[in-house]
Image (cartoon, rainbow, N blue to C red):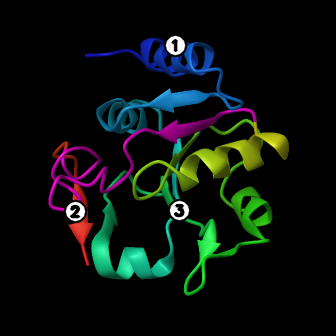
């Protein structure tokens, strides 16, 4: 069993190694462990409402999950209220894991949140569905779902 200290150290190591402008990054399995070990951690899903409705979402502890769109659907219009909505579910020093489909929008959200004064923003590597396979399908090579972590379908 990994300790909280080891998980936070791993996130920080990735921050240093990859010169990330936010607190760090964790793999899906590490993120799930962190959520189980530290009830203060919030998993903020930055995908669109449509993605939640059509694809599903992670299952985590009570009160640990929040959905805040980074971009709105349809049209991929940036959510101008993102930081204000984040303040409704986390304080500036709350450990937050940011999740999107394949870990692209979550990185952008982590940068924006850090610039707004949040000090413990972490990217959840691989995202919920992960990268596409050779046939263009997701959930088959990486991501929260592929790693066998708990989730509920649409």
The disc, 1 or 3, on the residue closer to the chain's N-terminal end is 1
Residue assigned mark 1: 9
Residue contact between numbered discs 2 and 3, judged by CB atoms under 8 Å:
no
Q: Is residue 115 above or below residue 86?
A: above
Between 44 and 24, the one nearer to me in the picture: 24
| Apparent side of residue 35 relative to residue 137 in the rendered image (left or right) | right
Q: In this orientation, which residue lies closer to the viewer: 44 or 72?
A: 72
Residue found at x 60% / y 77%: 76
Sequence order check, earlier mark of 2 and 3? 3
Image spot of residue 5 (x, y percent): 49, 13
Q: Mainly helix, strand or loop, the magenta region? A: loop
For the point 60% across and 67% down, which residue is it? 68
Under circle 1, the secondary element is helix
- Asked if residue 100 is among those painted magenta in the image, a careful observer would answer no
Residue 108, relative to residue 24: is it above or below?
below
Instruction: Describe residue 139's horizontal placement relative to residue 49 as left or right.
Output: left
Give the crowd class for mark 3: few <14, some 14-19, many >=20 residues within 10 Å: some
Residue 136 is marked as 2
Displayed quadrant of residue 73: bottom right
How far apart, in angstroms, are the residues tagged by discs 1 and 2? 34 Å
- Point out residue 122 in the picture as x, y percentages from the top left corner: 57, 36
Element at label 2:
loop
Quarter of the rendering containing residue 37? top left
Who's the residue at 44% across and 30% down the image? 26
- Would you say residue 66 is visible in this rendering? yes
Which residue is at the far right? 116
Is tag 1's residue or tag 2's residue first in the polypeptide sequence? 1
Q: Which residue is mark 3?
A: 66
């Amino acid at each position: 069993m990994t300790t909280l200290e080891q998980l936070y150290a791993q996130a920080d190591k990735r921050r240093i190694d990859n010169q990330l402008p936010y607190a760090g990054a964790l793999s899906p399995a590490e993120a799930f462990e962190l959520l189980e070990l530290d009830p203060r951690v919030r998993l903020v899903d930055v995908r669109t409402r449509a993605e939640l409705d059509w694809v599903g979402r992670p299952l985590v502890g009570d009160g640990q999950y929040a959905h805040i769109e980074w971009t709105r659907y349809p049209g991929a219009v940036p959510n101008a209220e993102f930081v204000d909505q984040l303040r409704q579910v986390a304080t500036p020093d709350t450990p937050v894991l940011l999740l999107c489909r394949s870990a692209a929008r979550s990185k952008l959200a982590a940068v924006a949140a850090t610039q707004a004064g949040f000090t413990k923003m972490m990217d959840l590597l691989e995202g919920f569905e992960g990268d596409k396979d050779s046939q263009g399908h997701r959930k088959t090579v990486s991501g929260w779902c592929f790693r066998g972590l708990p989730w509920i379908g649409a």
